[in-house]
Image (tube, grey):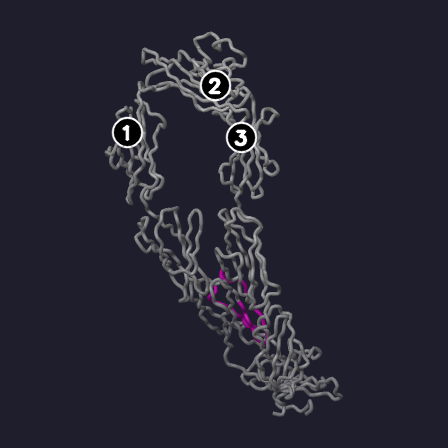
Amino acid sequence: MTLFDYVGSVLYNNSRIPNEDANLPTIGFEGRVRFVGDLTKGNCSLMITQLQKKDNGTYVIKVTASVENQSNPQILHTSATLKVSDLFPSPKLEILKCQERWALQVVCSVPSHCPEDPITMNFKGLEKHYLTSETMMMDDGVLRKTVTIQPTAKPRKKTITCQLSNKDMSQKSSIIQELDMKNCPNDVQVFIVNDPLIKEGDIVTLNCSVGGSTSSTIWFNWWKIDLHVANFKYSSLKLLTFPAHFGPVTSYKCEACNTYGCTSSPLLTVDIFFAPREVNIRKNPGGQIDEGMNVVLHCEVGEANPTNLFYTWYKDGEMILLDSPHAYLNLTNIDPAQTGSYWCEAGNSVGKALSPKITLHVICFHCDENPISIVPNSLFAWEKSCVVIPCHINQMPSSGTVNATGIVWYFKPFGNNIWSEGKTILLYNSSQTSGTITTVSDNALPSRTWLIGNLTNRDCSLLISPVRTLDSGTYEVKVTVSVDKHPWQFKRFLTATLNVTELPPEPTLETVPVKTQEKKLTQVICSVPYRCPHKLVNLTLNGLEEEHFPPQKRTVGNGVIQTALSFEPTWEDNGKMLSCLFKSGAEVLSQSTMKLDVRYAPKDVQLVILNDLPIKDGDTIAMSCFFGSSKPSDNWYNWFKSDPSTIEYKYSGPNLMTYPATSGPYNTSYECEVCNRIGCTASAVVTVEVLSAPKEVKILQQPEGRVHEFAKVDLKCEVETAKPMDLTFKWYRNEELLDFTAHVLSIFKTDPNHSGIYHCEAENRVGRSRSPAFTLHVVSSKH
């Protein structure tokens, strides 16, 4: 065969000389045929425009080419079939992945071989606010338009149309397909099954209701949440049953899950009704009750639900007030006849509760009422310091104004001593002109005693300075008073004790609260009894200067000198020694120390993978959760496993955990959490890469279809997944290893000898996998 052995109508021939109308096609194709290729680039394409039905048929191309290693030119030929349809082409519509919360691709495609008559392609049924991307491309004679959307659960079914038209809109076609959305459960709600009026002790049943789900397999998770803690219950039943207990307000929610995801319900607060608790009586005013006073008893309730309460009052076993809406009992102008035992009963719609009894003792003026007060009446001092015994004469409102007309102080030692021999000593008498009663030695107690009070101001306080250990004993004051409403005077007396030590007392060092916690405001208080205002002393706290620099606040009152500081402790403060110095000027009188006991959540939490690397598919991943320190040390562990598509929790697990190593499209991350009663601390997230041998190895032929002799064919060794992807390949024909290691086996000029059964083998450093058999049949040109 030569280049000039034509069969059929000649459409194009570039071998003719110009004056022979080299490029004129056969009659019927005039003006519709154009060579659009470039032989220098191996392109021999031919364009036929304005196609007609009679153009149906087989088109053959013959090319004269020089072939390497051959002296004579070779004639190459191949053919193509053209079928002209009366109808405009119909598109093909594909929907890739149709699940709520996943990106969805809609692909419309149609064969297109004529760039001079472009096809317009449009979608209908995809609203603009759903679209996330849109692309259009031509590949291997196919025009494709791809739209990516973010679907939602509603509506579940949606009609999508792909419409085609030519340039002048004279020809159109379309295809319609329904989008069926696979969604998570929707309209998830929690309902109380039993009576909404839930009383303490009732059995509560909650129902996790689901409006709809595309999957018949549904499982449920439950949450219980109050002010202090959130409890979880996974893979539970649709109904949650539990007894109603007294406690903080608790809310519940459920989560319904299917294979496409989970949906949570809103929180439902379960209100538990219970009778009043912790009923007590508070008396106002507190303290002693004198005749004629107005006294109010308050019936106080710690907790109750509902809170619309009613009260009943009792005295000495008899009811005195029934079902009052008020929580108080008024006793106006109280008299001795109202002395007795009182209690109250608080009730609501659930039940009632009684308070403990409280006894009222009404004291009249003539029942040995004493206007003198010494508070405190037990005093402490040390050698060479001083002390003030605080004495005051109080008014007696029920009897009129109290006026002190005389005062006498006495002293009686605890035991015998060289100057008193255990006898009572007169220290001060207001009826005498001098401050001391007799002339005594400078070392005697009377010579060191002064009345610093003022009877006009009802102050009868006594100063002893300096004190000696022999001054320990009982001090008695006797006061003569008169009252406006009584024509006669009467005398009252009161005693106080003084204990003098040789050395100053050690300061009392304490923290508030006693149990110190990290980052919780804590007060350190140092105090010492001190009733010597004439000598300046000071308290200084040490041990927190390096990190905190807290200011110290000094107070003096009620016979106590005190210094305090506030700070927020850290876990590093645990074990620090605090000291409090009791000083007079630069002299340290005494000191106290204490060790800070700071409770804190676990520190320096780390998750450590115990396996040797690399980790392969099928291995068991072992990991350990370590922490540096924790106080208290009653720890528990929580574990978290996640990838971009799933999260798995394990609460109150061990410190050692194992997971199966599985290879997938994503790497898996792990995190552990160490908890104690103070709180929880999480480790850094550790991501584990699991390696796997090649999987789903197969051979793909390009181009597809029958392979004719002299044609070029590529066999591609396709691997679906492998980690790592640095692969090597081996090729086999009829179980014989070929000298070829590339990803694609290219046969540039096929002949029947290339026919056979092919395998490819892909291998990485984890392992190897072999493809199924692939049969290649080369059709001989002789057939």
Dot 1 and dot 3 residues touching (CB under 8 Å) = no
What residue is shown at x 48% (from left), y 56% (from top)? 651
Residue 256's spot in the image, x, y percent? 41, 60
* Badge 2 density bin: few <14, some 14–19, many ≥20, Cα 10 Å: few
Q: What residue is disc 1 on?
A: 340
Quarter of the rendering occupied by the C terminus: bottom right
In the depicted structure, whether residue 170 falls above or below residue 359: below
**Of the pair 83 and 615, the residue shown nearer to us:** 615
Q: Magenta segment, which residues?
A: 118-146
Q: Element under label 2?
A: loop
**Of the pair 171 and 765, the residue shown nearer to us:** 765
Q: Is residue 151 left or right of residue 720?
A: left
In the depicted structure, whether residue 98 falls above or below residue 377: below
Q: Is residue 483 magenta?
A: no
Type of amino acid under label 3 = Pro
In the depicted structure, whether residue 191 falls above or below residue 337: below
Residue 688's spot in the image, x, y percent? 58, 62
Distance (Cα) linking label 2 and label 1: 47 Å
Which of the two marks, 3 or 2, is nearer to us in this view?
Answer: 2
Q: What residue is disc 2 on?
A: 416
Distance (Cα) linking label 3 and label 2: 31 Å
Q: Is residue 260 left or right of residue 716?
A: left
Q: What residue is disc 3 on?
A: 507
**Image quarter for residue 406?**
top left
Q: Is residue 123 magenta?
A: yes
Residue 665's spot in the image, x, y percent? 56, 66
Q: Element under label 1?
A: strand
* Badge 1 density bin: few <14, some 14–19, many ≥20, Cα 10 Å: some
Label of residue 738 in the image? none
Dot 2 and dot 1 residues touching (CB under 8 Å) = no
Type of amino acid under label 2 = Asn
